[in-house]
Image: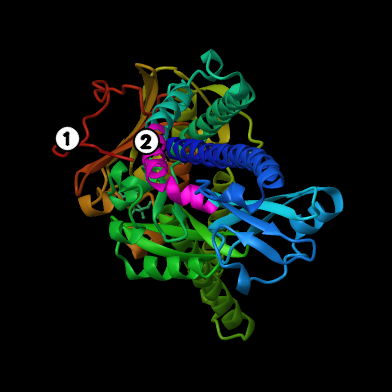
């Protein structure tokens, strides 16, 4: 800006100077030419008077170097010329000043010579004898004037130029200084030029708008940050070149990336070929997804292209942990296969036995045996179907089942009572320990927990063994203990016995009428009650399973010591589920 002002001032100053000079020269030239005309008129008058009185003799010895005197007769012939020989001179009647003088008594004219550098001015008077006397003078034209003054003019131009440069420099700085000193952070606080007040007001308004937009943007960013920070799913926003614009902590953890990875290419954070293919597809504007293994877990990556004006301007990458989902899917598949298998075995037995009987291939004496087999298998089927129904109800979260306060000890006593005939038949002694203790839960499910554990204690026992069921209060809740002196569970199976259809010894379990679902039901029901299960078992010695009804299983403290109950094996620490 300073430069432009500087140039403008320079040009303006020089322009004004040139025009002034031209005008000045014009005025000067006109003035001098007027003076010359005046002199020429006076001289012509004097010469005319002298010539009229003295004739040609008047011009003899007359020193008039500046003027040329010509005397013309009435016919236009030159009678006398102070510079040239009159004999060769042409008739002057047609000359303007001569014609005028003949007509009016005086005449004037001016004519350029061969070049434009000189001009002759003429002044003529008619004498009383009818002749005309003309005086002429050579006058410099304005070009000659300028050429004559070229040197001083050049010096003047240089001086003016220098002066204009200095002044323009200083002026431009002075003009621009208030603009440079403007405090744009506080536009309305400036007291510079009045003319820029609207501009400053506009700036102030725009600054206010920018501030409020920035604030809104910051709030939105904070909201977005808070949402994405709290997400367990990974979320990455990429630009059109797959550079990371935003990455939430969950995604950083997954890729083992630092917060500084923002701005870097995602493929420099993870070079997986699958990810590369995914991003390539998204870059073509196609939604893409894939499952990728990271740190031993399975993650589903959904890449959604962001399209604006028909071009892919970015990609939103959502990363979901599908390990559990896949595991659940696997369990469901296994469960379906197991259910079919479990149902098929007793159905085959029933159908086979019934077919033999129907075809008369069974001896009448064997009828009870076959009937017994059909009955046993039908019973197993009924138990199996009941257990499956129970499990599926638990899978749905036991919706609609009523919660109530109940006495765990009373439930234990009922169960012991119910199982006593079965236990006696197996030669197993049933004990009941503890004292009344209230728990909050779904009666049917808590009953199921106690029954399944005690039933297992009887079934996987030995002759003359015992099963002790205890219920008592503990800090923060109640604990149910079922301890037996049975066959025990090998350590490698202890973790898995709660899985559906998992049995340590398949044929033995089937022989005993087990469905393989009892402990799964126990685990589900315990989870619903926020209860924690502990298993302690030793092969050949026995098993002790405890269920801690603690309200909140993560914060509660549950004690192990039940001195009133028979000691179960404690060589091995308890395993928790
Ligand atoms: P099942 O109907 O076969 O008893 P469960 O789910 O109740 O099914 O138990 C799963 C497996 O755990 C059983 O097949 C058995 O091998 C083992 N088990 C459960 N309870 C005991 C126990 N008290 N003593 C020894 N083994 C047990």
Local SS, label 1: loop
Which is more N-terminal, label 2 or label 1? 2
Range of the magenta residues?
143-163
Q: Residues within 10 Å of mark 2 (few under 14, many from 20)?
A: few
Q: Residue drawn 38% across and 63% down?
A: 292
Residue in the foreground of this view, choosing between 511 and 67: 67
Residue 70 in the image: state x and y as whole percent: 64, 57
**Tag in front: 1 or 2:** 2
Q: Is residue 460 visible?
A: no
Residue in the foreground of this view, choosing between 499 and 350: 499
Name, please, the residue furthest toward the right. Answer: 103
Measured Cα–Cα span from mark 1 to mark 2: 115 Å
Left or right: 372, with 129 as reference point: left
Residue 308 in the image: state x and y as whole percent: 60, 58
Q: Is residue 497 visible?
A: yes
Q: Residue drawn 56% across and 71% down?
A: 347
Depicted 510 relative to depicted 571: above or below: below
Image quadrant where residue 154 sits: top left
Q: Which mark is residue 570?
A: 1
Residue in the foreground of this view, choosing between 510 and 257: 257
Local SS, label 2: helix
Left or right: 12, with 47 as reference point: left
For label 2, the residue is: 159
Depicted 513 relative to depicted 535: above or below: below
Residue 224 in the image: state x and y as whole percent: 51, 37
Which image quadrant: the C terminus? Answer: top left
Q: Residues within 10 Å of mark 1 (few under 14, many from 20)?
A: few
Label 1 near ligand 1 (CB < 8 Å): no
């Amino acid at each position: 800006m300073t430069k432009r002002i500087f140039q403008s001032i320079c040009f303006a100053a020089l322009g004004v100077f040139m025009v002034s000079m031209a005008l000045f020269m014009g005025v000067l030239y006109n003035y001098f030419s007027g003076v010359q005309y005046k002199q020429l008129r006076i001289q012509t008058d004097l010469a005319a008077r002298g010539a009229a009185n003295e004739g040609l003799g008047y011009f003899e010895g007359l020193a008039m170097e500046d003027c040329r005197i010509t005397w013309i007769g009435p016919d236009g012939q030159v009678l006398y010329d102070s510079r040239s020989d009159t004999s060769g001179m042409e008739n002057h009647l047609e000359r303007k000043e001569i014609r005028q003088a003949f007509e009016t008594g005086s005449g004037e004219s001016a004519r350029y010579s061969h070049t434009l550098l000189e001009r002759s001015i003429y002044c003529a008077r008619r004498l009383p004898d009818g002749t005309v006397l003309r005086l002429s003078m050579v006058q410099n034209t304005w070009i000659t004037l300028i050429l004559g003054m070229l040197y001083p003019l050049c010096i003047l131009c240089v001086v003016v130029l220098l002066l204009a440069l200095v002044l323009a420099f200083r002026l431009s700085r002075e003009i621009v200084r208030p603009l440079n000193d403007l405090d744009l952070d506080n536009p309305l606080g400036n007291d510079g030029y009045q003319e820029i007040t609207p501009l400053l007001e506009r700036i102030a308004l725009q600054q206010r708008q920018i501030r409020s937009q920035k604030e809104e943007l910051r709030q939105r960013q904070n909201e977005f940050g808070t949402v994405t920070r709290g997400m367990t799913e990974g979320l990455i926003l990429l630009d059109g070149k797959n550079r990371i614009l935003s990455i939430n902590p969950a995604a950083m953890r997954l890729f083992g990336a630092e917060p500084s990875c923002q701005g870097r290419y995602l493929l420099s954070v993870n070079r997986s070929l699958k990810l590369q293919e995914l991003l390539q597809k998204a870059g073509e504007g196609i939604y893409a997804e894939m499952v990728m293994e990271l740190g031993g877990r399975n993650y589903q990556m959904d890449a959604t292209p962001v399209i604006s004006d028909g071009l892919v301007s970015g990609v939103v990458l959502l990363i979901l942990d599908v390990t559990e989902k896949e595991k659940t899917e696997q369990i469901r598949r296994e469960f379906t296969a197991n259910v079919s298998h479990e149902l098929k075995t007793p159905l085959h037995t029933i159908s086979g036995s019934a077919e033999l009987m129907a075809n008369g291939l069974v001896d009448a004496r064997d009828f009870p045996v076959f009937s017994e087999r059909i009955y046993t298998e039908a019973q197993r089927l009924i138990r199996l179907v009941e257990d499956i129904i129970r499990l599926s109800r638990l899978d749905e979260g036991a919706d609609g089942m009523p919660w109530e306060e109940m006495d765990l000890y009373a439930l234990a006593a009922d169960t012991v009572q119910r199982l006593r005939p079965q236990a006696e038949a197996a030669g197993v002694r049933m004990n009941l320990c503890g004292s009344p203790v209230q728990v909050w839960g779904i009666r049917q499910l808590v009953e199921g927990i106690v029954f399944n554990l005690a039933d297992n204690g009887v079934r996987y026992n030995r002759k003359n063994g015992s099963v002790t069921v205890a219920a008592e209060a503990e800090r923060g809740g109640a604990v149910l203990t079922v301890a037996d002196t049975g066959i025990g569970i090998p350590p490698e199976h202890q973790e898995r016995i709660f899985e559906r259809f998992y049995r340590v010894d398949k044929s033995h379990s089937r022989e005993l009428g087990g469905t393989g679902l009892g402990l799964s039901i126990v685990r589900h029901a315990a989870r619903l009650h926020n209860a924690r299960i502990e298993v302690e078992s030793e092969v050949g010695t026995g098993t002790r399973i405890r269920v801690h009804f603690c309200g909140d299983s993560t914060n509660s403290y549950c004690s192990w010591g039940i001195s009133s109950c028979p000691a179960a094996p404690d060589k091995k620490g308890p395993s928790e589920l």
